Amino acid sequence: NPEEVVLSINNIEVVYDDVIQVLRGVSIDVPKGSIVTLLGPNGAGKSTTLKSISGLLKTENGEVTKGDISFLGKRIDNANAAEIVSSGLFQVMEGRRIIEDMTVVENLRLGAYTRSDNQINQDIDMVFSYFPRLKERTGLAGYLSGGEQQMLAIGRALMARPKMICLDEPSMGLSPLLVKEVFGIIEKINREQGITMLLVEQNANYALKAAHYGYIMESGKIVLDGTREQLLNNEDVKEFYLGGG
Ligand code: ATP
């Protein structure tokens, strides 16, 4: 079965505060081992889609009012955040949310808090092999640069040994050079660890290079989807998302 779908979002509608409808029938499939990107402008509903997947919608008085979401064949649209994490679906939030008054290693250990095996030190070394510069930073995580904090947030997700990681705008606040570096590492982790990924981005140039398949969301709807090649060659995508040409 070459196209086993790990995450399946099926025609969901999402409403905040009982009245504000933000998602208007969104369907997304993420096949096993792939990187899928969700692109779209500010306010399109990308973060809302991620919150629906992670069980965090309720904390903002939002609700999936129609459709369903399955992870590894199990319904998660009404599950709570802790249940979803322990089923192997981990989210790296926008703004990174590392613990600033803890060290890099302490932050990484936090990522492994649900584990009871004895390979945690090995996995810290594995994270350092992807992000060698984190190993050199022995002070508090609050002193890390924006790029290093992003790396730490991804590393902490890896420590949970997830089956799938959702990344919310990993390019945010990073220089073009760092974005390139972080996306290169994301691709490498996907290739070497086989972790399925959903990558939410405004930066379509980088995201489409890293992804196998992409969806474009505008005003709470998917307006276009296709393989990396199809989207990179689409005239509308070129004009509106890849900066002309
Ligand atoms: P951005 O890239 O700016 O994060 P986005 O594509 O992720 O944009 P969302 O953050 O999902 O978009 O927002 C989509 C719409 O939902 C916006 O109009 C926003 O104002 C609205 N919205 C988001 N969160 C809430 C909330 N907690 N309550 C009410 N409306 C909300």
Image (cartoon, grey):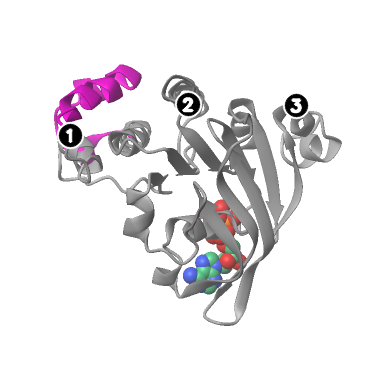
Q: Residues within 10 Å of mark 1 (few under 14, many from 20)?
A: few
Q: Do callouts 3 and 1 mark residues in contact (Cβ within 8 Å)? A: no
Label 3 CB less than 8 angstroms from ligand 1: no
Residue 192: mark: none
Does residue 220 appear in this view? no
Q: Main secondary structure of the magenta part?
A: helix
Q: Which quadrant: the C terminus? A: top right
Tell me which image quadrant ligand 1 sits in: bottom right
Which residue matches tag 1? 117
Q: Around disc 2, counting alpha carbons within 10 Å, would you say few (fewer than 14), some (14 to 19), or many (20 or more)?
A: some
Quadrant in the picture for the N terminus: top right
**Residue at (37, 49) in percent of width and height:** 87
Q: Identify the amino acid type marked 2.
A: Asn
Q: Position of residue 6 (x, y in %)?
A: 53, 42
As measured in the structure, the alpha-carbon distance from the residue carrying label 2 to the one carrying label 1 is 23 Å
**Residue for point 75% across, 29% down:** 232
> In this figure, which residue is indicated by the disc labeled 2?
190
Considering the numbered disc 3 on the image, is that residue within a helix, a strand or a loop? helix
Q: Quadrant of residue 160?
A: top left
Question: Cβ–Cβ below 8 Å for labels 3 and 2?
Answer: no
Residue found at x 70% / y 46%? 216
Residue 197 horizontal/vertical position (percent):
50, 37
Q: Nearer the viewer, residue 161 or 48?
A: 161
Q: What stretch of residues is rendered in magenta?
A: 118-145
Q: Earlier in the sequence, mark 3 or mark 2?
A: 2
Q: Which residue is mark 3?
A: 229
The answer to which of marks 3 and 1 sits earlier in the sequence is: 1
Above or below 49: residue 192: above
How far is the residue under mark 3 from the one under mark 1? Answer: 41 Å
Q: What's the amino acid at mark 1?
A: Asp
Against 102, is 65 above or below?
below
